[in-house]
Image (spheres, rainbow, N blue to C red):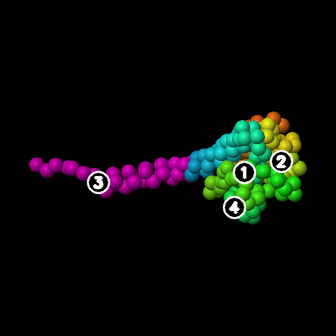
């Protein structure tokens, strides 16, 4: 008596075809999920730094600057930098001088870039005073990923940041 143990070649080919089809459907969705997670993580990180800058400025009674490098020209050796501005030289306020303490220096995740960064006066930085209030009228930081998804932050007059979304990244489409 002979036992038929194992798989036939046709059963094996059908199984491999089913697995290949499922992978072809799942992998692009998984990649999109990872890209969206990176975007969300970057926006959350900037939200945390804005909150931290505000709290640190009030607690230490110091001016704290969060500056961004949207052009990626390497001026701040990172994509964004949080530091204490001692304000000793009025001509170099807002710019980190040697000896001014860096609180955080960060880079955006791979595949994430700045779409637009603008605070009071259209500059890519904001400063919190010793009471924890930002200069000027607030501002925004908008990010995008390689899938053309947009996420950003609005900073209001009181220094409260909130995360906003846009489908197109165009002005007036952020909510």
Q: Which residues are magenta?
A: 1-30
Work out whether residue 30 or residue 66 is closer to the camera in this orientation and state it.
66
Q: Which sits earlier in the primary sequence, circle 1 or circle 3?
A: 3
Mark 4 = which residue?
77
Give the CA distance from mark 3 to mark 2. Answer: 67 Å
Give the CA distance from mark 4 to mark 2. Answer: 20 Å
Is residue 172 shown to the viewer in this render?
no
Looking at the rendered image, the disc whose residue lies closer to the viewer, 2 or 1, is 1
Residue in the picture at 43% in, 50% down: 18
Give the quadrant of residue 111: bottom right
Mark 3 = which residue?
8
Disc 3 packing (10 Å; few <14; some 14–19; many ≥20):
few
Work out whether residue 173 or residue 121 is closer to the camera in this orientation and state it.
121
Mark 1 = which residue?
83
Residue in the picture at 60% in, 46% down: 37
Is residue 20 found inside the magenta-colored segment of the image? yes
Measuring from the top left, give residue 12's x and y in whole percent: 34, 54
- Is label 2 in a helix, a strand or a loop? strand
Looking at the rendered image, the disc whose residue lies closer to the viewer, 1 or 4, is 1
Measuring from the top left, give residue 96's x and y in whole percent: 76, 57
Q: Which sits earlier in the primary sequence, circle 2 or circle 1?
A: 1
Q: Which sits earlier in the primary sequence, circle 4 or circle 3?
A: 3
Mark 2 = which residue?
119
Disc 1 packing (10 Å; few <14; some 14–19; many ≥20):
many
Query: Which labelled disc corresponds to residue 140?
Result: none
Give the CA distance from mark 1 to mark 3. Answer: 67 Å
Q: Is residue 66 left or right of residue 36?
A: right
Give the CA distance from mark 1 to mark 4. Answer: 13 Å
Measuring from the top left, give residue 16's x and y in whole percent: 39, 54
* Residue lying furthest front: 88
Residue in the picture at 72% in, 38% down: 59
């Amino acid at each position: 008596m002979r036992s038929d143990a194992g798989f036939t070649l046709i059963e094996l080919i059908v199984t491999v075809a089913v697995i290949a089809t499922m992978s072809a459907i799942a992998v692009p969705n998984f990649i999109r999920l990872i890209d969206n997670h990176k975007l969300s993580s970057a926006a959350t990180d900037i939200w945390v730094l804005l909150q931290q800058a505000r709290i640190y400025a009030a607690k230490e009674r110091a001016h704290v600057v969060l500056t961004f490098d949207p052009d990626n020209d390497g001026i701040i050796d990172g994509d964004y930098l949080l530091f204490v501005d001692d304000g000793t030289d009025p001509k170099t306020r807002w710019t980190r001088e040697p000896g001014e303490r860096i609180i955080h220096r960060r880079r955006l995740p791979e595949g994430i870039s700045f779409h637009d960064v603008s605070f009071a006066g259209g500059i890519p930085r904001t400063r919190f005073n010793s009471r924890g209030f930002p200069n000027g009228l607030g501002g925004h930081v908008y990010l995008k990923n390689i899938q053309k998804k947009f996420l950003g932050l609005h900073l209001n007059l009181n220094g409260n940041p909130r995360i906003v979304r846009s489908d197109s990244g165009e002005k007036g489409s952020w909510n």
